[in-house]
Amino acid sequence: MKKSFGLLGEKLGHSFSPEIHKHLGGYDYLLYEIKPGDLDAFMKEKRFGGINVTIPYKQAVMPYCASLSDEARTIGSVNTIVKDKDGFLHGYNTDYYGFCVMLESADGAQGGINPKDKKALVLGDGGSAKTVRAALSGLGAREVITISRRGENHYGNIDRHYDAQIIVNTTPVGMYPDNGNCLISFDGFENLTGAADLIYNPMRTKFLLNAERKKIPCVNGLTMLAAQAEMASRLFLNEPERGGSVSLIEKIVSAVISKTRNIALIGMPGCGKSTVGKILAGEMNRPLADIDSLIEAAAGKSIPRIFKEDGEDFFRGLETQALGGETKKSGIVIAAGGGVVTRHENLDLLRQNSVILYLKRGLSGLVTEGRPLSGSVGIETLAKQRLHLYEAWSDFVIEEEADPDHTVKSILKIIE
């Protein structure tokens, strides 16, 4: 009988684990979304060959295990369980390994984030925090301080630890669909050499966006997820050693990013974002979120009418609201309005999950009909106000061609 594996948790709609395990073995990988009151029955039925475990059950599953690995026993947290041929359950902690690989992969730091001889803060005190504290200590951190909502060190007196050099978020604050929330500000931390967030959806939480803004080397939890999954799959399949694990982890991360990252198009009004977006979405077999169309649908009237009856500020509020709803999603194409760059908060909304492409077209090639500001303010004036912002916000600049199909081909070549 073919063994099945999966992920146990309370809320799993955000999980990338099934996509990751597609690359790791020819087995079924299911999502076991179990309510706390049903956990006992689920663990006693054992209708799985092995499971990964996530919030909030990493400690709750331990009593069901006949044995624990040294890491799981020391940390007091289990994230991988394997059922043997006699039906006994054995608990492991592969998050420890995953977190170490995650730190090594951090952007903006040569050799990753190195905790050796550094003071580290761990936000949160759940099962994941136990693993992170153990890993930081194992990697030679000078001091590891837990920051929680209560206790000696909490968010209200975090200023006593402004000398910290590394901060790790292990809480779900900022995770989809709680996008945009963050427990701390980086103001006051003058010695930071690294920031890590175990969250991977969105790709850039508010925590990581704040770190990037201050040019602090940082990393999200996707590499940790892939690395712990790779190790878990070896346990599932009873393959203690597997050649090329690091390169396999890197390939998995790249594949997941490629599939889940949004493609956001920005540019002057009338440059063809909607047309290009529609073709691109078709080529990539992705949904299209045309922000202007969503605004019109929500308002029940056209954009020119919104400008005339309600004013630009009202329209910009609708734009940010629509953008916030769509940029939470993964794996879509977004055609943003021409004025999206006039509100700075929109940049964080776009950057949390998207690669941003600026469709650059000469002013003479822009369509002005049905675009209120292009007619009233003038294309040249808008260009002076916005062109530098499009450049600054974008990851890539696409020199747009008259034929939108050619533009789409250029985009596909770049993002691949």
Image (cartoon, helix red, strand yellow):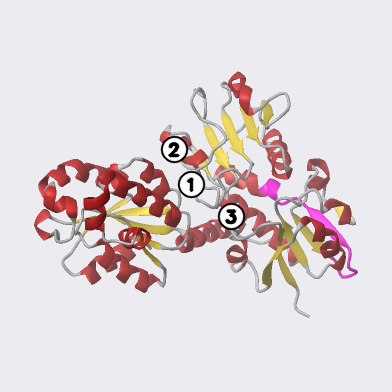
Judging by the rendered image, the residue that carries numbered circle 1 is 204
Q: Determine whether the residue tagged by mark 1 lies in a helix, strand or loop.
A: loop
The outermost residue toward the left is 364
Question: Residue at 43% across / 51% down in the picture?
Answer: 324
Residue labelled with disc 2: 212
Of 30 and 74, the residue lying toward us? 30
Is 303 placed left or right of 200 in the picture? Answer: left
Q: Position of residue 130 (x, y in %)?
A: 73, 40
Image location (x, y in percent) of residue 338: 25, 52
Marks 3 and 2 sit apart, C-alpha to C-alpha, by 25 Å
Q: Which of marks 2 and 1 is nearer the N terminus?
A: 1
Residue on which disc 3 sits: 246
Q: Which kind of residue does numbered mark 2 sit on?
A: Glu
Residue 22 quadrant: bottom right
Q: In this view, does 48 lie above or below 174?
A: below
What type is the residue that disc 3 sits on?
A: Val
Task: Where is residue 222? Give x, y as percent.
Answer: 56, 52
- Of the image marks 1 and 3, the number of the one nearer the N terminus: 1
* Of 31 and 75, the residue lying toward us: 31
Residue range of the region highlighted in magenta in the rendering: 84-97
